[in-house]
Image (cartoon, grey):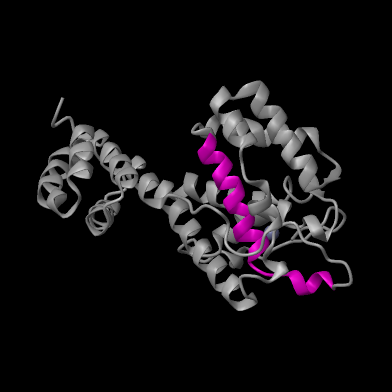
């Protein structure tokens, strides 16, 4: 949680020899910036500091243990989010990010939602950028713009729009402008987007993902998904032969057009 005025100390024994507990340390250190340097205006905007902090915590873990660890932790977080929303009920206003706490005790709103639904927003933006260095630059810009201040959702969204307009490609700005902010921030339940673990797994060359990708593409025939996944698999040179073999094995389960379009991604037809 953190607090600017009080210093808190942890015993060294908090981190076990195998690194268990390290993510908690990463989380609390990240709060020095997201939470302490820039904080939330009031508890209706509490999610902002936890969203960034969880995102940064996992980024740190990813730097230490590799990208698959970042995804693994995020996937665990998604499960916690689903459990939490199930407990509250998916229509419960306390599962919104931007809360209305009129007449309520803020402690009643405390759950995994601000952490996990919140960090999904940041994850979504990071993916929208398709350039994590540029997105890191946004985070630094955001922190320096609002240092020693407390902010609202409005301040945050204006800031990312402002930065993106100036620094990012036009299509990123357009996507951000078209973001369904009502669904993300003002509606209860799960966020309107789930991070794409499979694509991320392929891009980070995470071997155990291969089997999951093939199982998933075999299990459904949606053109868009299968095209994208096979295109990414094709770019993974060490997996290319197996990818093409798998394509020939499963293509007859799909509609002809799907097989044709996916085959084109694999450069099988001109
Ligand atoms: Zn925290």
Residue 161: image quadrant is: top right
Count of number-bearing discs: 0
Residue in the foreground of this view, choosing between 146 and 159: 159
162 and 256: which is toward the camera: 256
Position of the C terminus, as image quadrant, is: top left
Q: Is residue 109 left or right of residue 125?
A: right
For this view, does 48 lie left or right of residue 240?
right
Q: Residue at x 87, y 55 (%)?
A: 5
Q: Residue at x 84, y 53 (%)?
A: 4
**Where is residue 116, by image quadrant?**
bottom right
Location of residue 195 in the rendering, given as x and y in whole percent from the top left corner:
48, 51
Whether residue 234 is visible here, answered yes or no, is yes
- Residue at x-position 30% and y-position 53%: 209
Residue 53 visible, this orientation: no
- Residue 268 part of the magenta-drawn span: no
Residue 117 included in the magenta stretch of the image: yes
Query: Could you tell me which residue is drawn at 52 percent across and 34 percent down?
Result: 132
Q: Where is 49 relative to 160, above or below?
A: below
Query: Which quadrant would the N terminus be assigned to in this image?
Result: bottom right
Answer above or below: position of 92 versus 208. Answer: below
Q: Which quadrant does ligand 1 occupy?
A: bottom right
Q: Residue 70 location in percent, x, y?
A: 47, 51
Q: Find residue 133 and report its horizontal and vertical position in percent.
A: 54, 31
- Residue 184 x, y percent position in the rendering: 64, 52
From the image, give the main secondary structure of the stretch colored magenta.
helix
Residue numbers of the magenta segment: 105-128
């Amino acid at each position: 949680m953190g607090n600017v005025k009080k210093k808190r100390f942890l015993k060294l024994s908090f981190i076990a020899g195998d690194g268990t507990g390290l993510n908690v340390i990463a989380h609390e250190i990240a709060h020095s910036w997201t939470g302490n340097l820039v904080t939330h205006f009031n508890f209706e905007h509490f999610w902002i500091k936890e969203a960034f902090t969880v995102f940064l915590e996992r980024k740190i873990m990813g730097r230490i243990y590799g990208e698959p660890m970042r995804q693994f932790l995020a996937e665990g977080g998604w499960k916690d989010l689903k459990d939490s929303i199930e407990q509250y009920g998916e229509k419960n206003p306390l599962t919104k990010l931007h809360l209305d706490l009129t007449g309520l005790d803020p402690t009643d709103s405390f759950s995994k939602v601000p952490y996990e639904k919140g960090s999904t927003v940041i994850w979504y933006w990071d993916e929208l950028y398709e350039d994590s260095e540029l997105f890191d630059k946004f985070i630094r810009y955001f922190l320096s713009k609002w240092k020693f201040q407390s902010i609202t959702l409005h301040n945050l969204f204006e800031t990312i729009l402002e930065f993106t307009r100036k620094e990012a490609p036009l299509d990123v700005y357009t996507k951000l402008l078209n973001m369904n902010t009502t669904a993300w921030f003002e509606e209860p339940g799960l966020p309107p987007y789930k991070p794409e673990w499979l694509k991320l797994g392929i891009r980070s060359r995470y071997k155990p993902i291969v089997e999951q990708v093939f199982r998933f593409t075999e299990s459904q025939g949606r053109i868009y998904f299968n095209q994208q996944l096979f295109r990414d698999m094709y770019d993974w040179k060490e997996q290319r032969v197996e990818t093409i073999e798998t394509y020939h094995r499963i293509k007859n389960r799909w509609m002809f057009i799907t097989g044709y379009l996916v085959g084109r991604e694999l450069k099988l037809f001109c």
